[in-house]
Image (cartoon, helix red, strand yellow):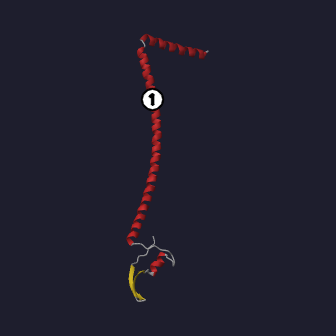
Amino acid sequence: MEHIESKVKCYRRKYKRKGKEYTTTQYVINLRKEGVESQGFKCDEDVIITHKSTFESLIDMKKDHEANLKEKESLQKNLSELQVEFNKLKNEYKHVKALLDKKEREVNHLENEVRRLQNMGLFEIILNKLRKKKAIEGEVEEGVK
């Protein structure tokens, strides 16, 4: 921010008009020529005059704002990276979940088969094996013909 420092000087003037005495206060702010020229101020340009403490607080606010913007950009970048990582993990989770579901179905099927075989007698198991063997041999003979 462009700025020039100076002091406000006050002058009290007393004068008389038509027998009455008046007092006025004049405020003067002197600016050094080199300060005005170095800051690029021009004649008839509008300027703002404020207390030095107010100006310093504005400078501090600007610095804080710039720091907040940098932090925001950093956090947004970090968020993007975390979002990518989250999406990868989410896809991996879906894949693992699908595998788990498949394995659970296989386990359930095998448990059902074990229960079925436990409920069958030895004779029924042997008969089923023979039937399956006969069915396979029958398919092989048909394929050979």
Residue at position x 39%, y 80% in the image: 9
Name the residue furthest right.
145
Q: Is residue 54 above or below residue 145?
A: below
What percent of the width, then of the height, locates residue 16?
41, 88
Q: Quadrant of the N terminus?
A: bottom left
Residue at position x 44%, y 20% in the image: 113
Q: Is residue 109 above or below residue 77?
A: above
In the picture, measured across the screen, residue 91 lies left or right of residue 51, that is right
What percent of the width, then of the height, locates residue 6?
40, 78
Query: Are there few (<14), some (14-19), or many (20+) residues within 10 Å of tag 1?
Result: few
What percent of the width, then of the height, locates residue 26?
41, 81
Residue at position x 41%, y 67% in the image: 58
Q: In terms of image quadrants, where is residue 123?
A: top left
Name the residue furthest front.
19
Q: Nearer the viewer, residue 123 or 96?
A: 96
Q: Nearer the viewer, residue 123 or 38?
A: 38
Given the image, on which type of amino acid does mark 1 rest?
Lys
Residue at position x 58%, y 14% in the image: 141
Q: Is residue 108 above or below residue 125?
A: below
What percent of the width, then of the height, locates residue 43?
51, 79
Q: Nearer the viewer, residue 41 or 79?
A: 41
Secondary structure beneath dot 1 equals: helix
- The residue at which mark 1 appears reads as 103
Q: In terms of image quadrants, where is residue 29?
A: bottom left
Count all numbered tags in the image, as a single digit. 1
Q: In terms of image quadrants, where is residue 60?
A: bottom left
Q: Quadrant of the C terminus?
A: top right
Q: Is residue 27 above or below residue 85?
A: below
In the picture, measured across the screen, residue 39 lies left or right of residue 9, that is right
